[in-house]
Amino acid sequence: MCRHMAWLGTPRTLTSLLRDPPHSLARQAWMPRRMLHGKINADGFGVGWYVTAMRTEPARYRRAVPIWTDASFASFAGVVNSSCVLGAVRNATVGMPIEETATAPYAYGRYLLSHNGRVDVDVLMSMLDWTRGAPAPDSRCDSALLAAAVWQRLAAGVSLAAAVAEVVVAAGRADGAARLNLLATDGSQLVATTWGETLSYRVSTDGDDIGMDVASEPSDDSNEWVDLDDHQLLTTDTRDVTISNLI
């Protein structure tokens, strides 16, 4: 159910991150190698990136079509570069709408979030507190509601890592069949979880190209990738990685 990736480090173009690698996110849209549920990610795609010299909030481009059909994205991705990028391709949960607003990454202020998996909508609705003042969900799909639950905790002053962990554990305990791989960023750190799906990371220290890749599955066959176990929380900046157990 979906694939996502994020980069934090030396500025790179969207093409170099999402299209050029031999097993890029664009390729994972039609031929994922490690996706445990589903076979293709053709229900939309999105990418968010930061231009901190201009504003703290990220820019986003989202479509409800397969990434390989979007000539406009292919035309500008090579001239947009950023030190922090989060991208996703979507395989919609059965019964969920196929629309741009249901496509990751979701945004709140300086934050971006993507969800790889599925979770019962009623469980998420019971977790939302409409008096907290955070924005309403983009969509009524499970992933958008999950993002809204994280946003509400951020609005209450909880840190990004703690908000993601709290929501994942609560939703996972309430729905035993939930798959809750989240990937989130505020432009200066990456936070990710494993809960029923795959996740890998790689630290890049090659000359001037320094940073961190976090992805549902490796974008190439390098032996530098590290696979996470299930039910773990990853928090990282451009050099240091902290991994802890969620349960």
Image (cartoon, rainbow, N blue to C red):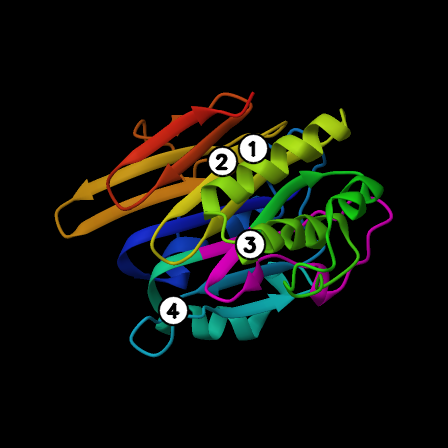
Q: On the image, numbered disc 2 is attached to which residue?
A: 217
Specify which label sits upstream in the sequence, 1 or 2.
1
Q: Nearer the viewer, residue 52 or 86?
A: 52
Residue at 55% over, 75% down = 72
Residue at 37% over, 51% down = 7
For label 4, the SS is helix
* Quadrant assignment, res 226: top left
What whole-number distance in Å separates the C-alpha atoms at marks 1 and 2? 8 Å
Q: Nearer the viewer, residue 50 or 121?
A: 121
What whole-number distance in Å separates the C-alpha atoms at marks 1 and 3? 39 Å
What whole-number distance in Å separates the C-alpha atoms at marks 4 and 2? 22 Å
For label 1, the SS is loop
Q: Please tell me whether residue 94 belongs to the stretch shown in magenta.
A: yes
Stretch of the chain drawn in magenta: 86-113
Q: Is residue 148 left or right of residue 222?
A: right
The C terminus sits in image quarter: top right
Q: On the image, numbered disc 1 is attached to which residue?
A: 33
Q: Which residue type carries mark 1?
A: Arg
